[in-house]
Image (spheres, rainbow, N blue to C red):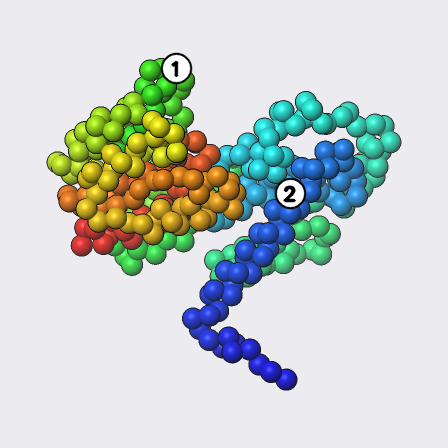
Amino acid sequence: RVSSPFCGTPSIAPAMAALSVQVEAYAFRQLVAHLQWRTDVQNVDIMNLTGFCRNCLSKWVHAGSKVYGLPMEYDDALERVYGEPYSQYKQKHQKKATEEQMATYKSGEAKHARTDPGPAFVASGVVVAPSGGAGGHSTVCGQECDALPPPAALDLGGATVQARVAVLTCSDRAHRGEYEDKSGPAIAEAVAAFAARNADAGFAASVVQIRVVPDEEGGITEALKEWCEPRCCDVIFTTGGTGFGPRDVTPEATRRLVQRPAEGLARAMAWQTSFQEPHSILSRGVCGITGQGVLIVNLPGNPAAVRQCLSVVLPVLPHALKMLNS
């Protein structure tokens, strides 16, 4: 019998646990890809065989976003599972259930994913078994998708951290009024929601500036400088202009002011979001600290991508600001 050299090594255990999560995530992505391929299989058929369907899977994704603090709308979760907006999928693939299918559905309701509380994650990560011994384990079917998220687990060591946040949308078309800016408001909404969940932990945040500018390097730099030089904010989130297009110049404008790069933030955002959207690694976004001690974070221009990136940045933001203000 040969024992593994990794067994009992504290520094290896977290890495192995992270790899296990990635393996499980791979299996989930393959399941979703298979369901997206098998558009001939109706939700009611899956429900009749297994007691759950694609909508249940979407609600598990949405529920998981609440457990782990990922800003996500239910429509976003549906699109991840269906591979396209749910309304489009229904129009193209969903058929009206037959009387036989509905009869089977009704007869099997006792085995459907439960609407009463089943096992739930607790702070320690231990799964608590339900009482009563009823079948099924899902807590999502019938769940309101705008239900309040579980309390966050920030530990600020008793300190109070306040964040003044500025939001800069960089977009020619939004500046010209050709379409509504949705990414800037998505940032403000996510910051407010994160602060509300962590108010008891001593974290507070307010959006003190918000602006839309065209994709002009000089204009973007001037807007950032206007906020940084008097230090009227602690962190600036930009959105848009981080891609490969000839007008995507937000990183270049940001580099003019950054004195200490925070490359770990940019790498973490690209790495984590690439599992959901492979094209996210094409973002050239820059993160760094200005001479005035203001943190600037470049986010992509898509509202869903903004929320994904903020799920990486927001949990570490309070500690970052504590260090900047120490």
Query: Which of the two residues, 50 or 20, is positioned nearer the viewer here?
Result: 20
x and y, in percent, of residue 105 in the image? 80, 36
x and y, in percent, of residue 69 in the image? 45, 46
Query: Which of the two residues, 232 or 174, is positioned nearer the viewer here?
Result: 174
Q: Residue at 72% across / 33% down in the picture?
A: 39
Quarter holding the C terminus is bottom left
Q: Is residue 94 left or right of residue 86?
A: right
Q: Residue at 55% across / 41% down in the picture?
A: 62
Q: Quadrant of residue 286?
A: top left
Q: Quadrant of residue 127?
A: bottom right
Disc sitting over residue 178 in the figure: 1
SS at circle 2: helix
Q: Is residue 203 left or right of residue 82?
A: left
Q: Amino acid at mark 2?
A: Val
Q: Which residue is mark 2?
A: 32
Q: Residue at 68% across / 22% down in the picture?
A: 91
Query: Which of the two residues, 322 or 39, is positioned nearer the viewer here?
Result: 39
Q: Are marks 1 and 2 in contact (CB under 8 Å)?
A: no
User: Looking at this rendering, what residue extends furthest in the right direction?
Assistant: 100
Q: Amino acid at mark 1?
A: Glu
Q: Is residue 46 left or right of residue 5?
A: right
| Callout 1 crowding tier (Cα within 10 Å): few <14, some 14–19, many ≥20 | few
x and y, in percent, of residue 266 in the image? 35, 46
Q: Is residue 253 above or below residue 65?
A: above
Quarter holding the N terminus is bottom right
Query: Which of the two residues, 280 or 194, is positioned nearer the viewer here?
Result: 280
Nearer the N terminus, badge 1 or badge 2? 2
Could you tell me if residue 278 is visible in this image? yes
Q: Residue at 46% across / 65% down in the picture?
A: 14
x and y, in percent, of residue 15 in the image? 47, 64
User: Looking at this rendering, what residue extends furthest in the left direction?
Assistant: 230
